[in-house]
Image (spheres, rainbow, N blue to C red):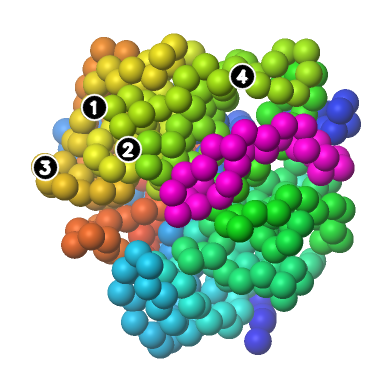
Amino acid sequence: MQRTIKPSLFYPIYLTLALVCVFSLCHADDWPRWLGPQGDSIWRESGILKEIPEAGLKNNWRHPVGLGYAGPAVAKGKVYVMDYVKTSGEIRNQASWKDELHGMERILCLSVETGELIWKHEYERAYYLSYPAGPRCTPTVAEGKVYTLGTEGDLLCLDAETGEKYWSKSFNESYGTTTPLWGYAAHPLVVGNQVFCIVGGEGSVVVAFNKDTGEEQWRALSAADRGYCPPSMIESGGKQQLLIWHGESLNSLNPISGEVYWTNAIKPSFGLTVAAPRIQGSLLFVTGMSSTSALLKLNDEKPGFETLWKGTITSSVHCNNSTPVMTKTMIFGCDVESSALIGVRVTDGERMWQTTSPTVGDLKKARHGTAFIVRHRDSNRYFLFSETGDLILAEMTASEYREIGRQRVLEPTNNTGGRSVVWSHPAFAEKSMFARNDKEIVRVDLASNAYKK
């Protein structure tokens, strides 16, 4: 059963141009996709507070939601978020154990100003996977449409204004594959007239669809494990390059044809490619489980690379749940084994400092400690959303992590390894943070003029 419910009141040059068009159509204060308008974890709005006031931050509104790891997207006065309303089943959250749930997977569209429901689209979907508490992927909003990918591989294209469905795909049915152990988690990438998705199956690890019709344009790559890392688009060596990091290697493809430009056999344990590669100029940083990380130097004249250094158990940072932020001189990320936020020097991968303050605090032997990191403009100031539900304002440099302030904005409603967590990347738009747990989504006012004495 599938239905949309509305309240009663209510790529060479071509691809470069397409990227410009997509970004220019986004309001300067929108967050229409995972990691922001340009996918680089940078919030570019001005007029943002520089410290958390003594009286605390203001919540503009709260709205109830169901289960989900999927962060919200914000575009043109609307907030889009996926959730799951469980009707039966038990959530045990054991790493290699699959739980079976039954319920409804939903896409909610809310008003940015009031948090009121504008429309919702829902469909029945049984889950059978590990850590089953809801969808993983942030909606992607582009040119009047919203693209969502559910936990069991349901790709939908909906009208962003009304929620009416244009087209849909079932990855498991169409490509003869099965849901990954931890669910479909690679956020769809929309560039130009294409939607790029990590699918799976023989010869179809990545598939390019027409964004308006859903028609397949090409498929490419095979791997025993497709991984969980979302597609990324970069420009290097005079070409647009689509980066696909599956469980066996990092690959650069021609986004128009699917032709492979180059492959780097960098392979984390358990096929856990999760964090997106980070680019800074001609440098590309890749990071994953089990001391798997490397800094690559991309060729200037044609697609290709050389490896500058590889991480070890005592160097670099090895991220899983959250994608690191890379500047010209530093990499800041949460290490999967130590749970520490680590500052790493770009030139050689040396660890300059580390702290668990923004992740698991004083807990000992905690793994997968998580904080979602967003840089404010080109400054040393960062907004971190901790797995504890705290919004943290901090300065991070080569020499130190300095916390300016923090406030609990949501209660951690999920759990892992005996501790309570909220693992959902927030959106930063409209001079606010939009964050969710498994019970509610909240808009937190971060405008500097909202707190004038």
Secondary structure under tag 3 reads loop
What residue is shown at x 28% (from left), y 27% (from top)?
314
Residue, disc 4: 306
Expressed as whole percent of the image width and height from the top left, the position of residue 387 reads: 29, 49
Any mark on residue 362, and which?
3
Secondary structure under tag 2 reads loop
Q: Quadrant of residue 147?
A: bottom right
Q: CA distance from mark 4 to mark 2?
A: 25 Å
Q: CA distance from mark 3 to mark 4?
A: 39 Å
Compare residues 162 and 291 and report the one nearer the observer. Answer: 291
Instruction: Give left or right: position of 131 versus 171.
Output: left
Q: Are marks 1 and 2 in contact (CB under 8 Å)?
A: yes
What residue is shown at x 23% (from left), y 60% (from top)?
417
Expressed as whole percent of the image width and height from the top left, the position of residue 231 reads: 64, 44
On-image quarter of the C terminus: top left
Q: Which callout, 3 or 4, points at the residue further toward the start of the chain?
A: 4
Q: Quadrant of residue 279?
A: top right
Q: Say which amino acid is labelled 3.
A: Asp
Q: Say which amino acid is labelled 4.
A: Glu
Q: Which callout, 4 or 1, points at the residue further toward the start of the chain?
A: 4
What residue is shown at x 44% (from left), y 82% (from top)?
101
In the image, which residues are magenta?
A: 247-274
Expressed as whole percent of the image width and height from the top left, the position of residue 185 reads: 54, 57
Q: CA distance from mark 1 to mark 3?
A: 13 Å
Is 290 located above or below residue 88 in the figure?
above
Q: Which callout, 1 or 3, points at the residue further toward the start of the chain?
A: 1
Residue, disc 1: 354
Magenta stretch contains residue 258: yes
Residue, disc 2: 335
Is 405 located above or below residue 379 in the figure?
below
